[in-house]
Image: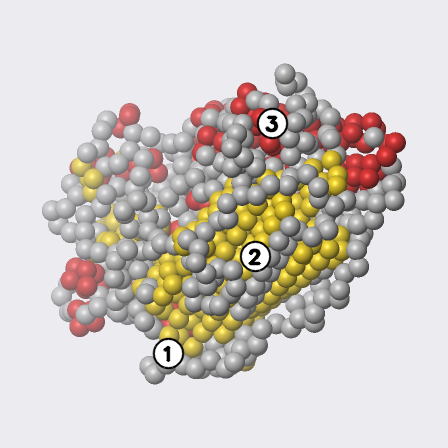
Amino acid sequence: MHNKTRKHWLPSAVALAVALQLGGCFSDSEDTAPTPPPPVVTPPTSGGPSFPEGAIMIEAGDNLTTRIQEALINAQSGDVIVLPKGRFEIQSTLLFDGDVDGDGAFAKNVTIMGYGMDETVLDFANANSGDGIFVQNAMQITIADLSVYEAKNNGIKLKNTNGIILRKVGAVWEGALDKDNGAYGLYPVECENILIEDSYVRGSADAGIYVGQSEYIVVRNNIAKENVAGIEIENSRYADVYNNEAMGNTGGILVFDLPINNHRYGSSVRIFDNKVYDNNTHNFANASANPAGVHIVPPGTGVIILSTNDVEIFNNQITNHDTLGLTVSSFFIAEPEISDFVANYGQPGQSIEDGWRPVPRNIYVHDNEISGYGAKPNGYLITDIINAYVLTHGAMPGILYDGLGELLANNGTAAYLGLREMPFAADGSDNVCMQNNGDVSMGQLYSNSNTDMSIADVLYEKTQTNLLKCAQVSLPVHTVTFGEQIFGCGVDDDTAGCDGGNLIGGGGTIGDGDGGIIGDGDQALCDSTASGVNWNALAKANCPKLSDYGLFADETDPTQNANGGMPYDLNTQLFTDYASKYRFVFMPDGTKAQYSENEAFDFPVGTVISKTFALPADTSKRGIANEDLIETRLLIKRASGWTALPYVWNAQKSDAVLTKPGAIQAKTVMHKGEAKTFDYVVPSINQCKQCHQFKAEGDEFPRFVPIGPKARFLNGDFAYADATVNQLSRWQSAGILEGLPELSSVPKVPAFHDGDEAGLAALDDASLMQTAKGYLDINCAHCHRPEGNASNTGLKLEYWRGYGDDNGYSHGTCKQPVAYGGGSLGYDVVPTKPDSSIMHFRMASTEPGDRMPEIGRSLAHEEGVALIHEWIKRLPAAACSN
């Protein structure tokens, strides 16, 4: 029987094994065979691209960032956008959204390219946002012949895109290898049909090439040099990684499957024909407490398989690694505390229930050349394992399998603990198999016959005789479909050993439809001289001036006297750098919004939501007379869906001008006696989608949705010109809302505004919980929910979601981050310890790579941070609080 009270199974077990087997210490075993010197490697060079007739040529010169943004916003299906030759300082993320008009039809076959990887260099060292290039909602996007340098967060990121070619691109952080370098170099996530080839990554503080939560993947002919992880395939299916060189990293190639709790788990990955060598760099990732972050990678490791099923590793050269050539491990190696493991992953609503499993199965490692390992083994995570092998056998093995997950599955412990791991199949199809890997030594921490996890076996064979010697059926070739083209090993190249096999590929499910980005519509409608709202222009044109729409009686004042618009406010604020906000909703005569209990109301076609931002000189003296008009954002519901248009007020404040690329303005605001100087950022038309879009589900297209006008935020009084009454009641009586139930049954978020933080200590725990949840809902839940842009994080912050439904896990309690390093912080929320919580840290930060929300603010909201600090401090202690 298992020991139900045992908490810390791995270190104690290995330590015991060492104590029991000291008689075999310091043997003469020698596993550091001479290694041939690696070849000299230089980044791939471009052969000089050619540009098609009609390509959109962006010239060097002033306002380059803005001109590139405009080209990306206005791109049509089939366009080729060529960036200029040279090295250029870029001010903000270059964002391409293939569904800019929100109709669910994606732009196709758009190419963004330069003159060569070394000829077109985009430098983001002084940018005000985290990513270099960000692509979302596209079909068949190509990025080629350019490099991104010094991105604060990720070099090139792609999301919700079907058909990606990254070819001859670079993602580089120059200089010292530092934890403050960006996270991922090339970073497709939640995508389909991904080809990454002939590219170069260097200096990433996480993974140089990272493909996450995606399927149908080919990564070939790349160089990953001096990153923490050279190449990482994480929570992804149907991937072929071949003909790459990974050198000088902490770990060469990683295949991870992590408990991210969003239904996306990995399998069917082939790693072959790669050169993996000299990956002995110190681990310079953020020293996070997250058990599965890349900071756990032992320096000097060639290939790591963690928790993933159905992996085949073959025909690779894996040479000259200080610690291990290759290791296969269950997740228990990363999270050895049994009580924490069950608490963090095995509870209702957590990852085990979501379908994730911690034990790797069907692993086949064969026909590799593995040499030159174990000369200087190190890595804090495996210190006990190193000691066990060195003291018992005098050396680390070249290949190590932990065997612990298999033991726990076979003896019933994992099932008993609610981890749903069944015994390995009797026919051997789940087994971890190794064969024909030359003279490499073999190690297995726990044997297949072990039934007592309190004693590790520390098995070792200097040359493989029996240990792990078996074979599995080879996996099929995995291919990428890009329009009419198919890419893959032996399909469009002559890589040996791939011909004649079964193929797995597919068109994917993202972005069905012909798509294309329409222009600005019928501009003649913008010239109407009629009084009142210009409904025709709102429906059919993106007008150059705000006044063209006739929304306000005084076209110079969008804060009052709307032509038929209903003013409204929210119970708790959506923070934007201490700006005041003036909101109105306009609906065509005779139309009504449909009430919804939890989501934004279902507004009729023709609806316009106007939100004007004005910055006070001093936050203690608000009111438009004391404020500077900055921007007015419109959400217009057209027949195709919602469209977002940002208008920036001119210097004379006589009108606001459509500014699709957004704008950056230097501002100063006095707040509580302190002058705060910052860059106020007006989001681009594409950035609006990052917050407002719900991703596609099933056969649905992505949906653009408003954030604020929900019942719980509107259920409060507003001072109208004639009376102060409940907003929902006024909307109903005005005939613009139907389906409203009795107000007593309508949810209501507690009010929280600047100044209210002084009363936080007086709130009881229940009131504090609701106030904090309301603030997180309006400021964070538009992304942090299953349908949102941050769905891959597993953080779910909708107000209606009960904190106690899953012991706070969805709200971040004891939840490890999926991608963010978090410095020394390991959990999104650590109850009773706000200063140990990533959520609190990121809300307080103003650094582009750290702050949350990542767009929409430059300053920290001190009052909101104080609210979340008090909330976390008073949460009931949990497993991670110790």
Relative to 471, is 572 on the left or the right? left
Question: How packed is label 3: few (under 14 Cα within 10 Å), some, or many (20 or more)?
Answer: many
Q: Amino acid at mark 2?
A: Phe
Q: Amino acid at mark 1?
A: Ile
Which residue is disc 2 drawn over? 272
The residue nearer to you, when weighing 730 against 328, is 328
Query: Which circle marks residue 362 in the picture?
Result: none
Relative to 221, is 281 on the left or the right? right
Instruction: Give the foreground label among 2 and 3.
Output: 2
Percent x, y of residue 37: 75, 66
Q: Is label 1 in contact with label 2 (beta carbons under 8 Å)?
A: no
Q: Is label 1 in contact with label 3 (beta carbons under 8 Å)?
A: no
Which residue is disc 3 drawn over? 408
The residue at the far left in this view is 590
- Identity of the residue drawn at 41% across and 53% down: 502
Relative to 662, is 88 on the left or the right? right
Quadrant of the drawing holding the C terminus: top right
Q: Amino acid at mark 3?
A: Leu
Percent x, y of residue 774: 42, 36
Which is nearer the N-term, disc 1 or disc 2? 1
Q: CA distance from mark 2 to mark 3?
A: 30 Å
Which is nearer the N-term, disc 1 or disc 3? 1
Instruction: Give the foreground label among 1 and 2.
Output: 2
- Say what secondary structure mark 3 lies in: helix
The residue nearer to you, when weighing 628 against 760, is 760
In the image, residue 409 sits, relative to residue 587, either above or below, namely above
- Say what secondary structure mark 1 lies in: strand
Question: How packed is label 2: few (under 14 Cα within 10 Å), some, or many (20 or more)?
Answer: many
Which residue is disc 1 drawn over? 56
